[in-house]
Image: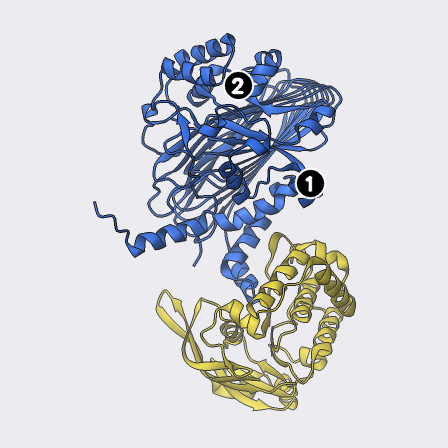
Chain colours: A yellow, B blue
Amino acid sequence: MIKIENLKASIETDDGDKEILKGVDLEIKGGEVHAIMGPNGAGKSTLSYVLAGREDYEVTDGSVMLDGEDITEMDPEERAAAGLFLAFQYPIEIPGVNMSTFLKTSLNAIRKQRGEEELDSLALLKLMKAKTKELGISEDMMKRAVNVGFSGGEKKRNEVLQMAMLEPKFCVLDETDSGLDIDALKVVADGVNAMRDEKRSFLVITHYQRLLDYIKPDVVHIFANGKIVKTGGPELAKELEAKGYNDLIGEAA
Amino acid sequence: MSSEISEETIQTVKDMAGKYDAGFVTDIESDKAPKGLSEDIIKFISAKKKEPEWMLEWRMKAYKKWLGMPEPTWQKPDFEPINYQDYYYYAAPKSMADKPKSLDEVDPKLLETYEKLGIPLREQEILAGVANPVAVDVVFDSVSVATTFKKTLEDAGVIFCSISEAIQNHPELVKKYIGSVVPQGDNKHACLNSAVFTDGSFVYVPKGVRCPMELSTYFRINELNTGQFERTLIIADEGSYVSYLEGCTAPMRDENQLHAAVVELVAHKDAEIKYSTVQNWYPGDAETGKGGIYNFVTKRGLCEGDHSKISWTQVETGSSITWKYPSCILKGDHSQGEFYSVAITNGRQQADTGTKMIHIGKNTRSRIVAKGISAGKSDQTYRGLVKIMPGADNARNFTQCDSLLIGDQCGAHTVPYIETRNKGAQLEHEATTSKISEDQMFYCMQRGIGEEEALALIVNGFAKEVMQNLPMEFAVEAQKLVGISLEGSVG
């Protein structure tokens, strides 16, 4: 499903280009959930931005294949149409644009890129009702401006709602647990778990093991200094929680 | 000179036409006054319009004043002095020599022009197309081509016609109100208009009548080097209500076209006027700044009676230079004035726009919401005055000015003046300046929305508070216009 090979990326700084991703190799098959764990500053969020095609980063080497399609050079909106979704660590506020307008614009922009017919307001409303109900989100949220005045939990639930609406093939969850209490975390995890199926892959980026109690990964990777340094099963996350990054990966951290 | 046109030129023109949809020229024979401005030209215009003697005298008085008046120089936009002798002050399609009695007599080319602009003039087509029909007066260069739904409005007692017709048919009303809100000598541009105004709309809503439909005027400048000097007069008698909208476009020309308009509104006791503008005059070439409309407009409303209300809403996207301050004089006690503005400048456009709220009566209230969006190498100024006169006990004003910058080569300035001569006044002023954030753009793009659509979405969100004041029928168009105006400003 998703195949990342020797991915290197750098960012422009005042002191010249700084390499942040230093050769990432990762393959996630359809139906699998992989977790990436790592210390702060390891480059985890950069990985999510580079996968989504954010302009600030320059890919200097390597490739990203999504469902057999090379997306390495694509613009962010093309990657979205190809089926990549990024749930943001800090969802962005867009004042004056209400959720239903935003979702309609987003969904139809993707459909248009795929050569599919655009949905009219009625069809969209039906879809929105169904998805909000499934996720236990109040319909009032659809009338509010995108993320404006949302609580931490509402913002994350909103990310999951968008994911459910767009039905991507590959979902990247960037520190979805940050700023959430246990109850909110459960709601978000339930939403993600409901979407798990054979045709969809997940990459869950997190600093803590806690999230992985609710979204059970098939594979866990430890990320340090711009690359994956250790890979294992779910037990690796527990081990990490017990020992800490320094003990487990030593110098690489 | 070689008659061959390079591929590059053709492509450039094509690209431009893609950006400014209304930029086509209607090929039509025109009846023009000789170039330049003189007493003879004013007599020519007055004669063409078969005006009564008093109107000509009024024009002449303005002309004499105008000759001695200095150009305003306090505005921010910078431009070459205008050579007033270089313009045509009257241009009318030949076929309009005798005003057609019905649309069947109107030159099909003219009808086509409006169809292309998306303004249907045939009432049955309008009725078939939308739930809430809008009556339209269309002005092409110096003349009104047609006014729709006249009969329906007449039945309600509402007068809606071109100002030329009003001078013929309702001289007592015109005489009473023309120049009563914007006096001839108010400023150089308004004075010029008073001397040479050609057409525009006239509305009178009688006592207690709620106008049964939205009224609108569509202005189009077609002829080369032609000034359009429209004059609009709207009177809402006691307890009446009217909502009016004007739209404007012009072909792409390399030369600057002059548009000096005057709009006067009078709201009597308990009356309300809602005036909306969607201005999309040709903005000039985005790279060189060549051409485009000089949009010098004086708009003012008088809340004459107690509990009257005037509300201005404007969406300004076009013109190379905008100089415009729709204002309210709050004379009646408990009267209210509102100004909602979205101004978008891109390319080399310059806009200096804002409002004046003059509080005279007791318990008067005003509200100003101005949203400025600057992109490209454009420059924009909000200029506003809130003035509280000694008798205006308990006057209140709320002002909010927000500027949004796109890119790093544009400018935004806010110049709010406040003059208070009454200690009981309550004034609030809020101002923000922000840049389109890359985070917002990336968030939208990650959700599949392309760069330009994302920008239009974010800007429309920024301008929402103003846009939602537009009549429903126009809000959608105005939102699209926001997107079109910003094309080429990112990437």
| Front residue of this view, candidates B428 and B490 | B490
| Residue B5 screen position, x and y as percent | 28, 51
Q: CA distance from mark 2 to mark 1?
A: 36 Å
- The spot of residue A28 in percent (x, y) is 58, 86
Is B488 in front, or is B96?
Answer: B96
Residue positioned 51% across, 15% down in the render: B183
Residue denoted by label 2: B182
Q: Quadrant of residue B101?
A: top right
Q: Residue furthest front?
A: B105
Quadrant of the image containing the C terminus of chain B? bottom left
Q: Quadrant of residue A187?
A: bottom right
Residue neighbourhood size for the residue with mark 2, other residues' Cα within 10 Å, grouped as few (<14), some (14–19), many (≥20): many
Residue A183 placement (x, y as % from top left):
76, 70
Q: Chain of mark 1?
A: B
| The N terminus of chain B lies in quadrant | top left
- Viewer-closest of B268 and B233: B233
Confirm whether residue B337 shows in the render: yes
Q: Is residue B75 visible?
A: no
Q: Which residue is mark 1?
A: B127
Residue extending farthest left: B1
Image x and y of residue A233, in percent: 63, 91
> Which numbered disc flags the more N-terminal residue, 2 or 1?
1
Q: Secondary structure at mark 1?
A: helix
